[in-house]
Image (tube, rainbow, N blue to C red):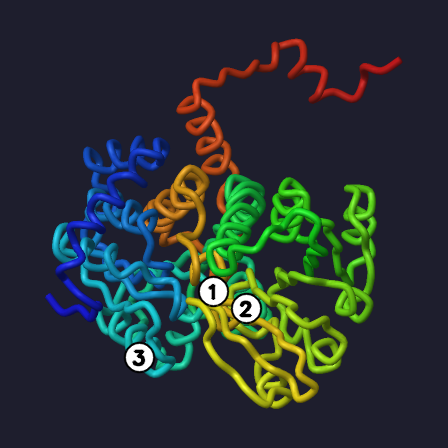
Amino acid sequence: MNYDIKDIKLAKKGALRIEWAENNMPVLKLIAQRFKKERPLKGLKIAACLHVTTETAALMQVLKLGGAGATVCASNPLSTQDDVAAALVKDLKIPVFAIKGENNKTYYQHIKAVLSTRPDITMDDGADLVSAVHRTPYSVHENIIGGTEETTTGVIRLRALAEEGKLRYPIIAVNDAQTKHLFDNRYGTGQSTIDGIIRATNKLLAGANFVVCGYGWCGRGVAMRAKGMAAKVIVVEVDPLRALEATMDGYEVMPIKEAARIGEIFVTTTGDTSIIRREHFLLMKDGAILSNAGHFNVEIDIPALEKLSKAKRRIRDFVDEYTLRGGRRIYLLGEGRLINLAAAEGHPAQVMDMSFANQALSAEYISKHRKELKINVFAVPEKIDRSIADLKLKSMGIKIDSLTGQQKKYLASWELGT
């Protein structure tokens, strides 16, 4: 078995951490039980470009029980948990090509290694894997029947590919499932981003001017958690509806140029490029802390920060100090990459339980409906989305009501009124 990881000796630690995650993923565990009996993915090869974390390991186990042969690489150079990669290789016999801190050259070599298995299904987080597929001749990967995409950034890229008429195979946008973005993006990103910032800096958030750039579901989650730790939250937005919502949620809303002057901790959550730029660095207070919760390290203009600086040093793990020519210092966390995975452990297992349930069931859906799927980016079927919510509620011991026959008739009619 070919693989490229940091150290196979880390497997014992990784196995224990994977076990802890699996114990907090009851929905995925129920799917695993069914997959083991039915083997809906039998004979299929899956190439997975995901954050190599304990929760991802739990998903890989489910796919394997379902009959699939999975191969894994990282979807971000800093997101790999090396002990988990070792356990996947040693204990689960799943090939992994991922090392925390790998350079860009190695990162893309690892993607190439995963694609060399000639997969039937791709499982992506950020669309780097699918992008690599589309940079090769069609004949190389003509056997791919479909794929899934985990995150907002990836879905945006893939929809652009589809609109240009260049998408080669159908993709299920897992991120668009309600049981994904309403919980993973909001509660998962919210908690894990704050976790990453605190682990990296050990700074007190209470009373700090905390700037959140972007008020999508991830931004909402980060703002909510920062407010819960008594930070003074400022939201930066370009969308008037989201800006209005942030205002009515109780946050101060202002342009980034104004926020740059007073902010102490900044988090970008937009999925776009150059949100915090040269002109903003020049306005920042001494000691300003910059972090990113978006998928790629483009939201903070790092090259511009480098040019403005006369010195750079690593002052703590995942904290780089940039000293500007005037003497002010700006601190960049996690090299501008996903701070929740660079400096912390990513989303808690309880929320990834639903996200990865969507991944597993979407792979099954692709397998069962391969002949009828059109080449496009489409949402997780509502039936799957609702079944995951139902399973999650049951695992939490929560019961809900059902509509009566009379209520169903009322909702389906137009005759009944005042």
Residue type for callout 1: Gly
Tell me the mark number nearer the camera, choosing from 3 and 2. 3
Residue type for callout 2: Arg
Q: CA distance from mark 1 to mark 3?
A: 17 Å
In the rendered image of this protein, does residue 348 appear above or below residue 136?
Answer: above
Residue 409 occupies quadrant: top right
Q: Which residue is mark 2?
A: 157
The earlier-in-sequence mark between 1 and 3 is: 3
Element on which disc 3 rests: helix
**Callout 2 crowding tier (Cα within 10 Å): few <14, some 14–19, many ≥20:** some
Q: Which residue is mark 3?
A: 106
Q: CA distance from mark 3 to mark 2?
A: 22 Å
The earlier-in-sequence mark between 3 and 2 is: 3
Which of the pair 354/323 is nearer the observer? 323
**Callout 3 crowding tier (Cα within 10 Å): few <14, some 14–19, many ≥20:** some
In the rendered image of this protein, does residue 319 appear above or below residue 188?
Answer: below
Which quadrant: the C terminus? Answer: top right
Residue type for callout 3: Thr
The residue under the point 45% across, 37% down is: 384
In the image, residue 86 lies at what x, y percent? 19, 59
Element on which disc 2 rests: helix
The residue under the point 47% across, 65% down is: 126
In the image, residue 417 lies at what x, y percent? 85, 15
The mark found on residue 126 in the picture is: 1
Is residue 92 found left or right of 248 in the rendered image?
A: left
Do residues under tags 1 and 3 come within 8 Å of each other at their CB atoms?
A: no
Tell me the mark number nearer the camera, choosing from 1 and 2. 1
Which quadrant: the N terminus? Answer: bottom left
Q: Residue furthest front?
A: 327
